[in-house]
Image: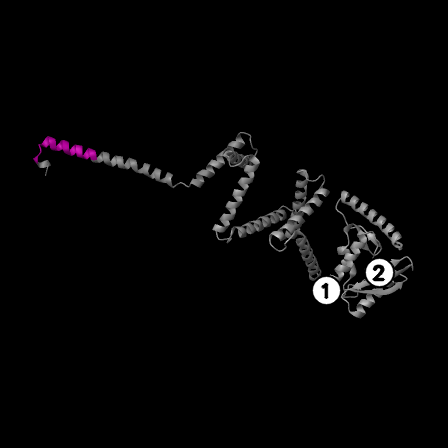
């Protein structure tokens, strides 16, 4: 309508300008569309992919500069540098005074974060439960690693290897800190500290009022566990039988420690009569079965008495199904002077230093044995 009232030339110019504008707008829209698509694609890119590309470039850069021989080595170098930088940041911020303190702090935070993650994921109800779960998983992974590397054939063997290596590392740490001069001294100190910590734990938990009471309680529990183990392994039929056998051979161990030779509990050599005497206790009652020409004869008299009266006491010459005193004797006698069929013998030892210590201990035991029998009116039988 509007074109109709315009002059012919003006109408042509207006139409031309309008068409040009439309074409220009169309071209602009066509040109902008790909750019918007590019922006959209860039916005949709995965940041993790960018991070992986950046990490790969950083690792390759380390290899090219000769700071690492392989990409795996470059990964280690990069991790070490990142860890060092994070530790230095803790020191610079005043959260830690030294790099060692910063390392401990970083470890504590990382552990706390991993435990909290277990709780948040529902795998553990509390942080305490998460700590136990993390420990179990870490130990299982360490055992499996030993098996995979060929250092152990089975998980059970890996358990033993891990325990030995952990114990050895703990002893070496004691020596390196200067708390002990040798590994042997560190072993003694480690045992003392472990026992002290265990006793203190009993007091802190309220199971014992004092350290003295805790010591008695620990002894009772340890003895009960040892007796139960004898029953579970079939070495004793009942706890009562295990108790008697344990007590019998605790006396053997005490005699050996005092330097006195003994082979069969309840049988001893008498100098005055030059015979073997059978004498032992059942509860509060003392049993004396006379003297005999040989040690074996005296041991058989002991066994017959025990069978006849149905005593829960292991035998020196057991029949099938009967408990043997030798089982208890070998288990509980001191390691450096366990007794066999021909007198004291050494146990198997691990290295030359331990062998020397064992030989020295046996020499002391034999020396003390000779002097003690001479002073008490007895004389040693030929070994």
Q: Which residues are magenta?
A: 5-21
Residue tagged by mark 1?
240
Q: Is residue 91 magenta?
A: no
Q: Is residue 91 visible?
A: yes
Measured as percent of width and height from the top left, residue 365 is found at: 82, 49
Measured as percent of width and height from the top left, residue 188 is found at: 71, 45
Q: Name the element at disc 2.
A: strand
Q: Looking at the image, how many numbered discs can be counted on the residues?
A: 2
Label ID, residue 267: 2
Q: Is residue 290 above or below residue 144?
A: below
Residues at circles 2 and 1 in contact by the CB criterion of under 8 Å: no
Looking at the picture, tell me which residue is in the foreground, 51 or 125: 125
Looking at the picture, tell me which residue is in the foreground, 49 or 96: 96
Image quadrant in which you'd find residue 381: bottom right
Looking at the picture, tell me which residue is in the foreground, 39 or 243: 243
| Residue neighbourhood size for the residue with mark 1, other residues' Cα within 10 Å, grouped as few (<14), some (14–19), many (≥20) | some
Looking at the rendered image, the quarter that the N terminus falls into is top left
Measured as percent of width and height from the top left, residue 360 is found at: 81, 45
| Residue neighbourhood size for the residue with mark 2, other residues' Cα within 10 Å, grouped as few (<14), some (14–19), many (≥20) | many
Q: Is residue 72 visible?
A: no
């Amino acid at each position: 309508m509007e074109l109709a009232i315009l002059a012919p030339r003006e109408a042509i110019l207006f139409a031309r300008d309008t068409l040009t504008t439309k074409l220009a707008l169309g071209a602009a829209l066509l040109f902008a569309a790909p750019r918007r698509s590019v922006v959209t694609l860039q916005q949709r890119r995965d940041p993790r992919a960018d991070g992986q590309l950046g990490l790969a470039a950083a690792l390759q850069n380390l290899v090219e500069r000769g700071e690492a021989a392989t990409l795996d080595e470059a990964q280690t170098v990069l991790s070490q540098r990142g860890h060092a930088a994070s530790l230095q940041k803790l020191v610079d911020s005043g959260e830690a005074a030294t790099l060692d303190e910063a390392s401990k702090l970083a470890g504590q935070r990382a552990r706390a974060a991993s435990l909290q993650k277990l709780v948040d994921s529902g795998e553990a109800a509390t942080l305490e439960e998460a700590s136990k779960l993390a420990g179990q998983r870490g130990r299982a992974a360490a055992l499996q690693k030993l098996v995979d590397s060929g250092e152990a054939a089975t998980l059970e063997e890996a358990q033993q290897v891990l325990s030995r290596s952990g114990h050895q590392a703990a002893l070496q740490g004691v020596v390196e800190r200067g708390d002990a001069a040798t590994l042997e001294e560190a072993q003694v100190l480690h045992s003392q500290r472990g026992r002290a910590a265990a006793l203190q734990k009993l007091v802190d938990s309220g199971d014992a009022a004092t350290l003295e009471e805790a010591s008695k309680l620990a002894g009772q529990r340890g003895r009960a566990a040892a007796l139960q183990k004898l029953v579970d392994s079939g070495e004793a039929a009942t706890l009562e039988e295990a108790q008697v056998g344990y007590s019998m051979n605790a006396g053997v161990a005490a005699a050996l420690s005092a330097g006195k030779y003994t082979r069969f509990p309840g049988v001893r050599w008498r100098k005055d009569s030059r015979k073997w005497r059978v004498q032992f206790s059942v509860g509060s009652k003392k049993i004396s079965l006379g003297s005999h020409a040989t040690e074996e004869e005296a041991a058989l008299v002991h066994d017959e008495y025990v069978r006849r009266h149905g005593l829960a006491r292991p035998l020196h010459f057991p029949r099938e199904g009967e408990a043997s005193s030798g089982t208890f004797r070998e288990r509980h006698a001191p390691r450096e002077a366990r007794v066999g069929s021909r007198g004291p013998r050494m146990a198997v030892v691990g290295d030359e230093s331990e062998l020397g210590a064992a030989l020295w201990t046996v020499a002391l035991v034999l020396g003390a044995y000779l002097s003690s029998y001479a002073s008490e009116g007895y004389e040693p039988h030929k070994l």
